[in-house]
Image (cartoon, rainbow, N blue to C red):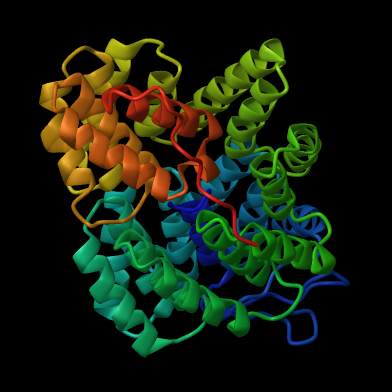
Amino acid sequence: MFTLGLVVALIAIAAAVLFALRAPERPNLASAAEAADVLLPSSEFLDAAEAVSFYEAALRAAGNNTAYQVALAQAHLQLARTGDETTHVPAAEAVLASALDRDPDNVHALLLQGVVLNKLHRFEDARDLADGLLAQYPSLADAHALRIDALVELGEYDEAVAAADLMQSVRPGLPSYARVAYLREHYGDTDGAIAAMRMAVDAGAAGTEERAWAVTELAALYLGKAKVDIARFLYEGVLDERPSFAPAVAGLGHVALVQGDAQASIDYLNQAYRLTPSDGFLELLADAYEVVGDTDAADRTRERVLDGLAAARAMGEIVDMEEADYLLDLDRDVEHALRMAKAQVERRPGHLHANETMAWALLKNGRAAEGIPYIEHALRLNTGDAMVHFRAARVYEAADQTAEAQRHLRIALDGNLHIESGASAEEARRLLASLSGSSAPVRSARLDG
């Protein structure tokens, strides 16, 4: 199972872990690099809002100053990770555009611009920017990181693996290990992904945002293997170091839902959303409301997800695949969803989830047989993603390929589909019983501690 928000996590790491940046002198500004007057790799502003205010004032006083502008953009991106993206991502984009107008070759501004491009799902542009930087600076690890993230999202996985190997040779550490973990997960090597993410955790400094991300993603990997107690322990450990780290709070909400305490899940997920508005939290929250029988709250929450996607689109983010996938799950606007899915699979034909979404869209439009090549392409790396196997089963069942449908239902259930979606797991058990010609229920997977 691909972990929730891992791409966002990697982009956050890319934004926080920058090539050493010489910052201008400044008064008493709370910063991790205050003593050295340098934003070092893995540094973060202790008070990003104060940093924004300071650098805005400094720019008003000093006029356009590239170093001030880059620091301001970095502060905006830090705030975007923990607050209102629709305010702070465009602000960062605008200030970087101004900085690059003045100094088109500024490495630090270009790296941050690459982070913004990936955030806006402009992956081709981010890849090209990274290629340009690496042509001049082959050992610039952060440019390697930008390139890997873009390649993964373009579905160019073999090239991303080669790039990750190169990044590790240039600068082993948390950012490179985290990307290795993500790629191993794509290739179905969950144990290898856990090993790499443990290395990322060990490479991070206690209390920092990047280490909190790594521990949270490690917890999600264990949760995907139904190691629920380990996942909960890790989420709680993150919150001991960073009590307001929203992804860890949401992780506890996911654990509670899996363990059958939907009300606790609702409480955790609402808390997480108050800390950091994220559509990913809302999607799980809607599921929790369904479990407690509050369908009105579930429907309202799903509308909030769609509102969030619309806001992201207005900000300039390309969300066709995400919106198509969500609409298809809701059985809404399925023809429009198919058009968006088609545009994305044409744009990045190797991408696993783009192919999965295209197959799902064809099924929902009554064209299941046409979806088979796409779902098979989505399965080609043997990721072990239970939801993909569940959707494959639905496609094969609708295309009258019963044996294949049964096979994929068993794989999905054995792969802990209930962790990703309890409702889908129940549907899978019912469908498998029906296709097997048996009224006996299919046994649920056991949760290991």
Whether residue 137 is visible, yes or no, is no
**Where on the picture, by quarter, is residue 64?**
bottom right
Image spot of residue 169 (x, y percent): 35, 89
Nearest the eye: 33 or 172:
172
Q: Is residue 155 above or below residue 209?
A: above
Residue 162 vs residue 26: left or right? left
203 in relation to 302, above or below: below
**Residue 96 in view:** yes
Place of residue 341 in the rendered image (x, y in percent of width and height, measured from the top left): 27, 28
Residue plotted at (18% across, 28% down)? 402
Please state if 413 lies on the left or on the right of 79 as rendered: left
Which residue is pictured at 52% across the width and 28% down the height?
Answer: 423
Residue 40 location (% of width, % of height): 63, 81
Residue 7 image point, x, y percent: 46, 54
**Vertical comparison of 26 with 374: above or below:** below
- Quarter holding the C terminus is bottom right
Q: For this rendering, which residue is in front, 351 or 410? A: 410
In the displayed structure image, the side of residue 364 where residue 400 appears, left or right: left
Give the image quarter of residue 223: bottom right
Q: Along the horizontal axis of the image, is 141 left or right of 409?
A: right
What residue is rendered at 11% in x and 23% in y?
369
